[in-house]
Image (tube, grey):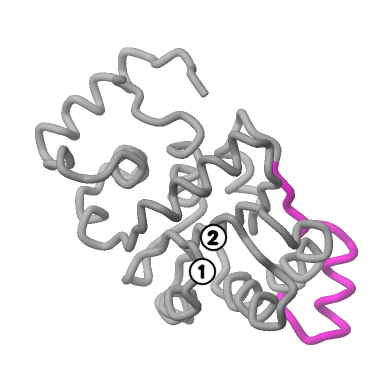
């Protein structure tokens, strides 16, 4: 997907590349890594991300083909302005299910979304570790076959553990090792797969 690139964004990327050498990264890995560094102004992401080029390529192909995009937080959706996404966390159904099952609303929303996006969706988790754990449970139960899981939840309680659990599944995934993450970072990863290199 091509889009107009503002001169400030272009200059930001030129500065980024003067600070961090990403030239040897595979194309999708480079796009995602640079977009996250650009979004956060934090080159430390280069050594924190865990990427797989084939998984990112599959995610990009799924989005190019119009696959469902499911996100765990409205802030993730807000950061992805050119592609429709599903976010059920604010709905009454998620609130009701959470109460009945003893789940967080984020986990309940993922369970609900799994009913309609079981095959070939891209999932972007940027807020709640419980959402990522629930996604893994749905996969382990044979209810999900994602094209890609962007697992970048944030927090001192469960975030690093959820991402480690994601990597252990063998699912096509993007994650990071540390507890940091967030909605803006997850949205940046999706945008990288949609837009590619802004200087290309």
Q: Which quadrant, please, contains the C terminus?
A: top left
Residue 171, label in figure:
1
**Callout 2: helix, strand or loop?**
strand
Up the image or down, 10 lies above or below 116; here it is: above
Please tell me which residue lies in front, 19 or 175: 175
Up the image or down, 49 lies above or below 130; here it is: above
User: Which residue is at 78% across, 61% downward?
Assistant: 113
Quadrant for residue 148, please give it.
bottom right
Is residue 42 shown left or right of residue 144?
left
Residue 83: x and y in percent read 64, 33
Is residue 155 shown left or right of residue 31?
right
User: Which residue is at 40% across, 31% downward?
Assistant: 196
Q: Do tag 1 and tag 2 residues touch (Cβ < 8 Å)?
A: yes
Residue 149, label in figure:
2
| Residues shaded magenta | 85-105
- 132 falls in the magenta region: no
Please tell me which residue lies in front, 7 or 116: 116
């Amino acid at each position: 997907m091509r889009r107009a690139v503002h001169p400030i964004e272009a200059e930001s990327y030129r500065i980024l590349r003067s600070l961090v050498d990403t030239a040897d990264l595979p194309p999708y890995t480079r796009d995602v890594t640079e977009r996250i560094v650009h979004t956060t102004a934090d080159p430390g992401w280069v050594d924190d991300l865990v990427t797989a080029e084939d998984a990112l390529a599959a995610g990009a192909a799924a989005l190019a083909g119009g696959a469902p995009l499911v996100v765990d937080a409205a802030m993730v959706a807000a950061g992805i302005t050119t592609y429709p996404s599903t976010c059920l966390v604010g709905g009454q159904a998620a609130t009701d299910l959470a109460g009945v099952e003893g789940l967080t609303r984020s986990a309940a929303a993922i369970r609900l979304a799994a009913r309609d996006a079981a095959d070939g969706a891209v999932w972007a988790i940027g807020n709640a570790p419980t959402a990522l754990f629930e996604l893994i449970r749905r996969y382990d139960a044979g209810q999900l076959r994602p094209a890609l899981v962007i697992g970048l939840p944030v927090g001192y309680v469960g975030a690093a553990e959820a991402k480690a659990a994601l990597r252990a599944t063998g699912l096509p995934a993007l994650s990071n090792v540390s507890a940091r993450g967030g909605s803006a970072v997850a949205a940046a990863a999706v945008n990288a797969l949609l837009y590619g290199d802004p200087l290309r």
